[in-house]
Image (tube, grey):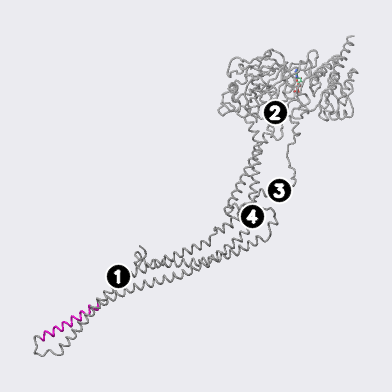
Amino acid sequence: MGFSTELQGQGAHEVLLQRQDAELRLLDTMRRCLASKLKCDREFAQGMAGVAAQATKRDWNEELPDSTLAKAWCSFATGLSDLSREVREGAENLENKALQALKQLHESRRDARKTYHDEHLKIIQRLSSLSEAVQRKRNEYQKQLEVYKTTRSRFEEQYVNLRIFPLAGRTGPKLAEVMDKYQRACRRLHLIHNEYVLLLNEASNYEKDFRTSLLPGLLELQQDQQETTLTTLKKIMSEVVRFTNLSTEKFSEIYTRMNIGVREIKPKEEYQKFAENHKTIPKAQQKFLFDESLTEDSSGKLQPNVIAVDNLTLDWLKTKISELENDQKEVQGKLREKEEVLAKSKLQNGLLDPLRIEISAAETQAKQEIELLKCDDRQKGNQLSLIKNPLNEIGCEEIPPGCDLSLVQTESRSTITMTDTLSAVQTRHGRFQKLFKKPFSGGKKSHSVSQTTLTNISVPGSPRDSSRNSTFLEMTDPLQGVPGARGLGEQDWFHGVLPREEVVRLLKKEGDFLVRETMRNEERQIVLSVSWGNSHKHFIVQNSPDGMVRFEGPAFSSVPELVVYQLKSGLPVTARSQVILRNPVAKETWELNNDDVMLNEKIGRGNFGDVYKAKLRTSGQDVAVKTCRMTLPDEHRKKFLQEGRILKQYDHPNIVKLVGICVQKQPIMIVMELVPGGSLLVYLRNNANKLSCRQLMAMCKDASSGMKYLESKNCIHRDLAARNCLIGLENIVKISDFGMSREEEEYIVSDGMKQIPIKWTAPEALNYGKYTTLCDVWSYGVLAWEIFAKGGVPYNGMSNSQAREKIDGGYRMPAPEGTPPEMYQLMVRCWAEKPENRPKFDEIFRIVNQLFENHRQTAIM
Ligand code: ADP
């Protein structure tokens, strides 16, 4: 096996030649490339030596003492120099050893190829020339054979003639000539025969040699040579590789040294050390803290750092959320764009190499921008959660009011809450058994209001009383069309449109609850209010499209069923609030059903609506009913009920008495004792000629008695005037019109509301809005003046501002004709500029009472 046996054919010979040619080309390429590499290595070594020299031009260790980076750099620079030396040495070796050998080998291989080619040609040619010679000899042989045959024929012919005709004399020269030719031809033939034999022998032998030794020998030799060449090349290549190897021990030593330097770089420690060495006092942290004093006066409605979610801010919050969400979307879009651009630029610039990332200024800038966008994104997200969290927390809870429009601040809250007068008004916290009055009970109302006067009262104009036309008010069932409201109005714990402030006062113990109705975005909503923790939770009953109602749990067809389920199951109303219903709080006695009141004729017109004479359906008691126009905004309705709330706690003959409020449905109403004489002012004017001084004194006494009572209750009336007093049987004066046109410390000057009664109001209240009982004392002086002026107009002929100016200048009204001097004296005292110089109601009552008594006695005598 091998060239000698396998490659004898002509085709193989040609392939072998091609192979040798290719190998020669490869050798030539190797030679040239190695020469180039050599040049490169030399240049590299030279360049590197230059770099190393440059790197160590400055003494970094001296410039940056203790710097591990400087140390690492120096060992790296030394490494570079070593590297340069190693590469140069490698190049020398490459040239002296490998490259020289390669050159020689290339030459010898070229010669060998030629030899092979020539030798092969030679032996081939010999064989073919022998073959040709054999052919030629054979042809010659053939020709000679013809000649021989001819001469032999001629000779035989002559010879025969001689035998036949011996004496004819035909022998002689002709026979001899023929015989000679015959002999020569014969000789010639024999010679050619011999030559042919010899030639054949030679050719055969050569052919055999060619086949068995000459050609195989040549091929074998060729194989040997090629193998030897390859062996030599292998050695050369191995040398080349060795000199190209940058991972030799020496290089790896250099690398190790370089690496040790690098490993020694400890950024943290280095800069910690650096920082320690160059420690300075940092700038004080700038803190952005909520100024808590700002929320002090907000009655807990505003909390530091907490977003205020209430009816005042709800719309704003919603807008803010959508603004923030849009902004955030925009920011996130930009962020994605920047990140994509950055990723692309990394790919394009091949900057995925972490070593490069830090050094690309454009990339750093892009990253910074991304960071800023991320901050912005986070910022928006934070703000969104700051707003959304409290909003979500509210969930189905009712949005709390932002502004507490309950009674004025100067009145002590403790004295005006309804809950403090519970001795007067019995609460009826229904037991659980009584809780659920079945909707559609259809039969007689089982609602049991403990106050005997309050049963089976209907409103004229309502379907129950078709005898009267409702000309004054639209009586509508507010629950009509409200999902799930079936049977709700009949539940004791349904408090109708009772304002939230009242609701909060009724719910005291944890788990106390009631249901009420409210308006939100012009839509009626049923709200479950529960006392929980230290506050009150309000849950809006959720309506599903199929008319069912629910909180978070199962849906029911009516609110009563839903509430009973919540109570019985003991499950939290909402998972987040964990509020559990425990005790239904029934309507208080003063919460009447609208249907319990039968309105009769209109007897007056108030700020919020008309005033009617009415009858309680149950007891037949005559009452006066103040109605609140349904068109008035919610805020005004709340204010309207404030009068009821204040009056509810008072019980005095000279204070108009509250019977109850009707909040089950619209219109909400305040039911009061009917004071038959109506307005004191009108009465005074109408009866001016009939009224005696004693009667007038009695009126002043009544008014002072009522005011003394209010003073003892820390109540400031703020609108004391004859027009706001009522006159009853036996000329008894009753103070009325409580808290109607007041909001905290100021009167509201708006649609349908009273303006500040300048001529009745004390200067400090007008000038500084400062209301105290002593302001009421000033007003009492004016009231007394009105009484003695029998309904006269104070500061007559003066406008409000003129009067105010005059008063500020020290002017005081003169006494009306017939006013007892002591009484006028008292009036003047009431009008003392400084509040502290005015008498208190206690004293006023004493004086007026004394005067009245004196007067009575004088009158009697
Ligand atoms: P407002 O406080 O809304 O201004 P008022 O209390 O002044 O309403 O009442 C308006 C009018 O209705 C009074 O002037 C009076 O004539 C009449 N009125 C009010 N309350 C009663 C009452 N309890 N008994 C009789 N008449 C009343």
| Mark 2–mark 4 distance (CA, rounded to whole Å) | 81 Å
Q: Determine contact: label 3, label 1, CB under 8 Å.
A: no
Q: Earlier in the sequence, mark 3 or mark 1?
A: 1
Residue that numbered label 4 is attached to: 72
Amino acid type of the residue tagged 2 in the rendering? Pro
CA neighbours of label 4 inside 10 A, class few (<14), some (14 to 19), many (20+): many
Question: Residue sitting at 8 percent across and 85 percent down?
Answer: 164
Residue that numbered label 2 is attached to: 633
Q: Nearer the viewer, residue 170 or 595?
A: 170
Q: Earlier in the sequence, mark 3 or mark 4?
A: 4
Residue that numbered label 3 is attached to: 275
Amino acid type of the residue tagged 4 in the rendering? Ala
- Classify the position of the C terminus by image quarter: top right
Quadrant position of ligand 1: top right
| Mark 3–mark 4 distance (CA, rounded to whole Å) | 20 Å
Answer left or right for 221 relative to 621. left
Q: Determine contact: label 4, label 1, CB under 8 Å.
A: no
Q: Is residue 573 visible?
A: yes
